[in-house]
Amino acid sequence: METKDKELLRGGQFLVKETKCEDVFTPEDFSEEQKMMKEAVMEFNEREIIAHKARFEAKDYALTEEVMRKAGELGFLGVAVPEAYGGLDMGFVSTLLVCDYISSGTGSFSTAFGAHTGIGTMPITLYGTEEQKQKYVPKLATGEWFGAYCLTEPGAGSDANSGKTTATLSEDGKSYKINGQKMWISNAGFCRLMIVFARIENDKNITGFIVEYDKDNPNGITLGEEEHKLGIRASSTRQVFFNDTVVPVENMLAGRGEGFKIAMNALNVGRIKLAGACLDSQRRILTTAVQYANERKQFNTPIADFGAIKYKLAEMAASAYAGESATYRAAKNIEDRIALRQAAGNSHQEAELKGVEEYAIECSILKVAVSEDVQNCADEGIQIFGGMGFSEETPMEAAWRDARITRIYEGTNEINRMLSVGMLVKKAMKGHVDLLGPAQAVQEELMGIPSFDTPDYSELFAEEKEMVAKLKKVFLMVAGAAVQKFGPDLEEHQQLLIAASDILIEIYMAESAILRTEKNAKRFGEEAQAVQIAMAKLYLYNAVSIVEKNGKESIISFAEGDEQRMLLMGLKRFVKYTNYPDIVDLRIAIAEKVKAENKYCF
Ligand SMILES: Cc1cc2nc3c(=O)[nH]c(=O)nc-3n(C[C@H](O)[C@H](O)[C@H](O)COP(=O)(O)OP(=O)(O)OC[C@H]3O[C@@H](n4cnc5c(N)ncnc54)[C@H](O)[C@@H]3O)c2cc1C
């Protein structure tokens, strides 16, 4: 266990420590049990969701509830829940896997599923007392009750701790009365339990409560009408009004003023699960697109044979592949961290809480990256379908609309971008991740004379891994110089933070794709992984461009004169390939494979 502890990087350390390919978990490492689970979930998705797609698009809210209930009967709602509370306790990777493969049929079900199993249930499993867990979690794990999460208010969105909902202690000290208005509450229309955040007196931080909601005995709770939304049309989204809603004191979650912490930690889990929930949508969009492209002929040619379409198919495949690689890599890190903590004597609850918190940076990175990839993928999907893509009669239109929300909820992508860098800087200050040492080393390297030796790139990914190491140097160089310049005021320079975050995101995603492929090439052979190798190289090439653009903009904005020149020279050195990959050939190879298989096949 001790050695494993040493190998297991802490959250954010991927930036400054090398990860060996043997140490990453990949989708090719699924156990037999996980593969069976995947099959079962895919079959459920086809039968219960895809087959009724039109009803979801027609705002059939009752169908969402019905399918959720069926998911509960099959145990899918309790995958992450400990057995003691009626769940399957299958571990974090399996939780992600279920979330991934159940979510692609429609964003409506995916949102209901995510809101219930994540933010609707996790606050109790992570923070509840034994009594609270015994009383509520089995009902939630089996789908007897559904959960909703009431944080957002009309005046409190991204600034979640600023809510005006109040909780007032009764004179006898036995209950709280909740008053206020919540907004955008997923599952509100059919939930039986709400996690509600409210402020007690003038507390700095909000407090979390478990609130039962029985329609026959509403206890001061009323719901607004269903919101009419761009996408996820059969996901119930309503306002919730609390008017002297009485909640027994024993239903307070954690302690008074602990609500903000609960909200943030529940969101960490929600973020990586949201990334998981976008993966199979991406695969499905690509599969649908390539099937159409293989059949649709223009100029007597299947459009899939046109270079312009091959470009899109290849880019879509590479981004889906990188998304899978990074999501499952982080999921396993979380699972291992939880196991380590349990082995060290932490309770399941404490271990899970700290395990996820440790990788909050990666959770934010994944949320942003995968939500934007699925949106781009759906957008290109529409383009491949041409005019038909714009029609409600083909699946692309709904996929595009459904994808759009993923950039907004679970913390907007702007907030998550800034969080990822902010949390990294905080970890560095706490001494959990040593950024200073490596940043100084980069500075010294910049002053020195570059090596003119001819490097040996004969091994697979030798140059690509060196490139990832150089991209890390770009982050350290740019972020290090910005921290020196602005100190704690850096948080006022949001454009810089966002640029730094884009660099960080690309590093994590590209590295994950490379490590997964390297691991698989070692065990299955390079020939068998030829297309995966092409995808990893293509992803990295795109990542380098993004890093270069963001690095350049940042340097120009905060450095002048000699410093600017030195940093720009460093940037140029760090984004330079010795042997540029032939990106056009890589795209052709990827597209030909996808075309031949007529689906996303990795
Ligand atoms: C369909 C749907 C379902 C939802 N489900 C739930 C749910 O179940 N429970 C729940 O509690 N909430 C839910 N939400 C709410 C969701 O989490 C919020 O919409 C989201 O957090 C953003 O808050 P907001 O809408 O108030 O936007 P705002 O916070 O007003 O943000 C508007 C814009 O300003 C940007 N911005 C805000 N603050 C900053 C800043 N400091 N720096 C830079 N940019 C900033 C944002 O990134 C965004 O681009 C849901 C929303 C939708 C649309």
Image (spheres, grey):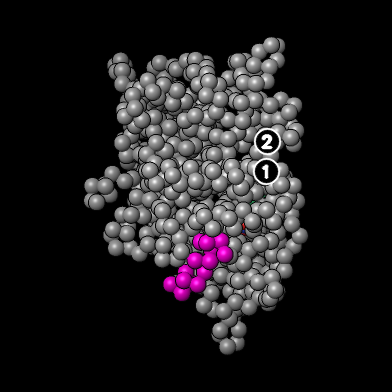
Give the residue type that dot 1 points to: Lys
Q: Is residue 541 magenta?
A: no
The tag on residue 198 is: none
Vertical placement of 346 versus 305: above or below? below
Determine the residue located farthest toward the bottom in the rendered image: 172
- Mark nearest the camera among 2 and 1 is 1
Name the residue nearer the viewer: 196 or 233. Answer: 233
Instruction: Report if the CB atoms under discs 2 and 1 are less than 8 Å apart.
Output: yes
Name the residue nearer the viewer: 40 or 423. Answer: 40
**Magenta part of the protein: which range?**
130-144
Describe residue 118's horizontal placement relative to residue 477 as left or right.
right
Question: What residue is shown with label 2?
Answer: 395
Residue at (43% x, 42% y) in the render: 35
Question: What residue is shown with label 1?
Answer: 53
Q: Quadrant of residue 405?
A: top right
Query: Which percent across, then down, holds residue 436?
Result: 35, 43
Q: In which quarter of the image is residue 498?
A: top right
